[in-house]
Image (cartoon, coloured by chain):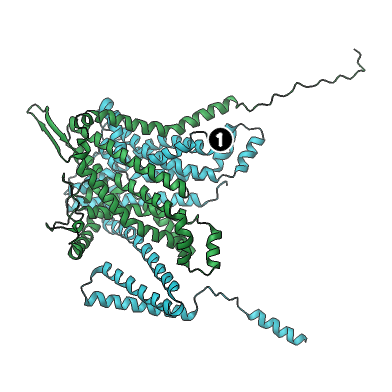
Amino acid sequence: MSTTETTYVIPEKRELTTKPRFSDKVFRGVVTGGGLSSLLILGLIFGFLLYQGFDILKSQGFDFITTSRWDIAYDEAGNVLSSDFGLSSMLIGTILCSFIAVLIAVPISVATALYLTFYAPQWIKKSMVTIIDLMAAFPSILFGIWAYFILMPSGVYWAKLINHYLGFIPLFENKDRYFQGSPFIASLILAVMIIPIITSISREIFSQAPLDRIQAAYALGATRWAMIKAVVIPHGRNGVIGGAMLGLGRAMGETVAVYTVLNIVFAINWKILFGVGGNVASLILTKFGEASAYEIKGLMAAGLVLFVLTLMVNFASDQLVRRFGGSGK
Amino acid sequence: MTMKTDTQAKTYQNVQPKRPWQASVKDRVTTAIVLAIAIISATLLVKVTGLSGKLGFFFAFVLIFVALTSGRQYRRFGSASAKDALVNTLVAAGTFLTLIPITSIIFEVFSKGYKGIYLGLFTSDMSLNSPNDPANVGGLGHAIIGTLILVAIALVISVPIGILTALYLTEIKGRFSQPIRFLVQAMSGVPSIVAGLFILSAILYPITKQNSALLGSLSLAILMIPTVARTSEEVLNLIPNDLREAGVALGGTQWRTVAMIVVPAAKSGLLTAVILGVARIAGETAPILLLAGGGDRFNFDPFNGPMGSLPYFIWNSFKSGTPESIARAWTGLLVLLVVLLFLFSAARFLGNRKVGK
């Protein structure tokens, strides 16, 4: 070993690893935890409502959704003697109102979305999109009070017109001539509330229609409508259906706006112009104020039914929008 | 020779570019005439026949306009063009129908609500007033404070969770991305009353046994998380991947990259998400009625006792039913609407700025 000899120290081979460092592990853990919180919350909602409503669901069984009575008998000490909880009229009312709302809202929303995507000049498009987004952010109490004071009189007038000319159809029958607070008016306000939702989803899906095919259609001499019929509608049909289902889910869970206009009665009513209707969410709000601890359990069970119903509708809509169109909004 | 090219150049200079897709003067005049005919005949129909009201006029006008334009296009270019004209009118009419309710809502709220606005409205509460008092007595100061407290607590809970969810979906993209995206979607569909019932059954009945703002905020947070999460996800998706790659290439861990590059780049967008979340819950009524209850006086303690809020104030005034209290409800709606409009324009302003600056 002499000093003249140069020594080459080969550095130790650097360890190449894809193992995340400690900070990254913590980061990933925290973020994943945050991400899974939605699962936790939904699970807790289901669990607690089931826990609180279990007694009622057990004692009523399937009668809870197939019968239509809501009676509790107490003795003088306030103990429950007998009880009947049945949601069928409320469920039917909820579904009926929401379906009619979607039937009213879909044509208007699709027309608006088509207009904004393919017809409107840029400045109209921009301001309309802002207005529609704003409308989607309005709280339901605003719609509710507006509906009670402004929409109700017009709605009653339209209901009378429909009844006068189409009253022979059982759906539009109204022998008692009582038009206030009918499911029709509730449907109108629900339609107003879900139009922005369906419009923005339809618009998103229409704007993703393949540009090359649109241009090909124009190049072949198609008019605008022929292009829409040949390219846009086949492309967007299922996405629009998904958007409509999302609107349906929203309409089913709406509480305050329906509560202000609908006349809630425990009777199954298919005549949409007749002022008797049902709605699960509004029922909860109506009964909550004076409910006993036992009745609250019934309301919890009703909330569970509503939760499961909206979850199912949402799941279906999510599948449709995801499979056939852009990201649902 | 030179003369000729000169004149040629001059004439070319004067040639305006043709725009064959634009309506010619003749077309415009015809459209105006058709429009006028439709308006006049619709007015006549409403006057003379059984049709009446604005809606009657609207339908008559649309029908006549459709008939005239489609007929004209049919004569000129045939049935395809006629159909096109028909659809053209129908989609425009649909857009108009969409506009009616929102115009009416804003107009009615402003015209009915402005009478109740006075300075004391924002400083006093309703503890000494009955529903029969005129609108210039008492106020909604307690309701504004209550809404601020409710929203602030909900914000503290939901913003971290919402943004973490969005980060999971955009940065980690793990195994659960697809299910979580669905769950967030499902959560945004949870009816507000169900969120209220959940807190009621989980906390109010078993533990606290009394209304408080904290419980109201918890239910509002459930409603706010999906809005924050989804808007943030959209914003984070817009951040160019180059930034992330640059961060990692410089030797940063993922944590450093996200915390020092991605999130600062998306700052204004994330703020938009938070504002939209606040707009979503500021007017939420049903869970507030169940959980926060409501009061007529100032309450600054979020953990004890019922707390008033703007939606409760509006709801209570509406339910009282006297003309004075209904006027008060409209005033409350006006305040709420102004708050929402402000939040919304702030979100627009921030959202319009370029991402990444």
Name the residue that disc number 1 marks: B259
Quarter occupied by the N terminus of chain A: top right
Compared to A111, does B167 lie above or below? above
- Residue B198 location in percent, x, y? 30, 33
Compared to B229, does A213 lie above or below? below
Find chain A in the image and tell me its colour: green
Name the subunit of mark 1.
B
Quick one: which residue is furthest to the top in this view? A1
- Residue B214 location in percent, x, y? 33, 33
Q: Nearer the viewer, residue A308 or B47?
A: A308
- Residue B71 location in percent, x, y? 39, 77
Query: Hey, which quadrant is residue A67 in on the image?
Result: top left
Q: Nearer the viewer, residue A143 or A199?
A: A199
Quick one: which residue is furthest to the left in this view? A76
Horizontally, is B9 left or right of B168 in the view?
right
- Residue B274 location in percent, x, y? 44, 42
**Residue found at x 39% / y 74%:** B70
Question: In this view of the protein, can residue B57 be seen by the observer?
Answer: yes
Find numbered disc 1 in the image and state the secondary structure of the residue it sits on.
helix
Find chain B in the image and tell me its colour: cyan
**Residue found at x 74% / y 83%:** B5
